[in-house]
Image (cartoon, rainbow, N blue to C red):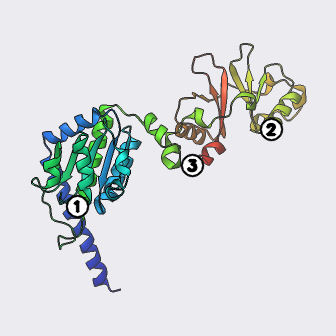
Amino acid sequence: MTDADKQTFLDTARRVIATEASALAQLGQGLGDEFADAVELLLSAKGRVIISGMGKSGHIARKIAATFASTGTPAHFVHPAEASHGDLGMMAQGDVVIVLSNSGETPELADLVAYTRRFEIPLIGVASRAESTLIKQSDIGLILPKADEACGTGVVPTSSTTMTLALGDALAVALMEHRQFTPEHFREFHPGGKLGAQLARVRDLMHDGNALPLTSFDTPMSDVLIEISQKGFGVAGVCDSQGALVGIITDGDLRRHMAGLLDHTAANVMTRAPQTIAPGALAEEAVAIMNRRKITCLFVVDPDGSGVPIGLLHIHDCLRAGLG
C-alpha cells in the first residue's frame, strides 16, 4: 500500500464524517414542535414503546429500542416481516409505535401500520418525505432533512441512518431527563460489564454477617490472630462496648508489635480511627480511597451514625467486579 493510497483512505473517511456531521446539524436545526409532541406522546404511553423498521432501519430500530429500555422507557423491537406472521399480537392498546423508513414507502411495513390504525394505537413515523405514506398515516411525523448520503452515490444508507439513530437518542434522553433518570436507575438495568462495575455500590460487593472479622478491646491477641486467620481478610476490626468500630488490626500492626505480641490485647495493637466507607458509596470511590491510602480493605459502617460495622470491602472484590 502506497502513501497515496493511505491518504486517499483518510480523505474518504474525513469526507464521510464531515457529510454525516453536516446531516446531523441539519437534523438539529430542523427539529420543531412535532419532536416535543412525540416526547409527550411517549410519556403518556401506559404500555410499551414498539419500534420497527426494515433493513438498515431495522438495525437502527433495534438499537433505539435497547436505548429506551435501558433508560427507563419499556420498549422492544418488532420485525415488520414477523409482525405479518403473528407478531402483531405483541402490540396492544396503551402502546405507542415508532416506525422508521427513510423513504416512508417500505412495503413490509404496511400490515404493521394498518394494525395501528385499526386498533387506534398511536403511531410516530420517521421518514425523509413528508408526503410519504408512512408520514400521512402517522399521528406524529418526524421528518429527516434531505441531507446527502455519505456514500457519494445517494443509494447507500449512511447519513440517513446516522440521523435516525441520533433522533432516537434525542427522544430517549429527553424522556430520561423528564423522568429524572439517575445513574442509580441506570445501574439497575446494567448490572454486568464495565458500566455495571462503575456504577456498583459498596453494598453490592461487600462481605457482611458472620464473614466480618471483628473483635473487642480486651480480646487477647492469640484470639485475634485466630479471627484474622479464619476470616481470611488479613485484618480484624476492633469494636467498643456499644459495637462501634474504633480500631483495626492489620499485618503492619502485627509486625510493629512482634515482640511480646501474645501478651497484648487488641486495644494495645490496633490502629485507632480506621478509614471507613458508607454502604451507599460508589465502589469506585472505595477503590480510590484504598489506592490513595495504600490499603487493601475498608470496613463499611452503618450510615445511621452509630459507627457499627456492617460490612467489609476488599480490593480483590473490586478487581473481580472489573474495577481497579
Q: How far apart are the alpha carbons under marks 2 and 3?
A: 32 Å
* Residue for point 64% across, 43% down: 317
Q: Residue 75: horizontal and vertical position, in percent?
A: 37, 43
Which quarter of the figure is the N terminus placed in? Answer: bottom left
Q: Quadrant of residue 265?
A: top right
To which quarter of the image does residue 103 belong?
bottom left
Q: Amino acid at mark 2?
A: Arg
User: Residue 133: where, in percent of width, then height?
Assistant: 14, 54
In primary-sequence order, the first of circles 3 and 1 is 1
Residues at marks 2 and 1, CA–CA distance in whole angstroms: 78 Å
Query: How many residues crowd around disc 2 within 10 Å: few (fewer than 14), some, or many (20 or more)?
Result: few
Mark 3 nearby-residue class (10 Å; few <14, some 14–19, many ≥20): some
Residue topped by disc 2:
255
**Picture coordinates of residue 204 (x, y %)?**
59, 35
The reply to whether the C-beta atoms of the residues labelled 3 and 1 are less than 8 Å apart is: no
Which residue occupies 9% across, 54% down?
A: 131
Identified by mark 3, the residue type is Gly
145 vs 257: above or below: below
Q: Kindly identify the residue that appears in the image at 80 percent across and 24 percent down.
A: 266
Q: Give percent across and percent down for residue 193.
A: 52, 49
Residue picked out by circle 3: 322
Element assignment for label 2: helix
Q: Secondary structure at mark 1?
A: helix
Residue 107's tag is 1
> Mark 2, mark 3: which one is toward the viewer?
3
Query: Label 1 is placed on what type of residue?
Result: Pro
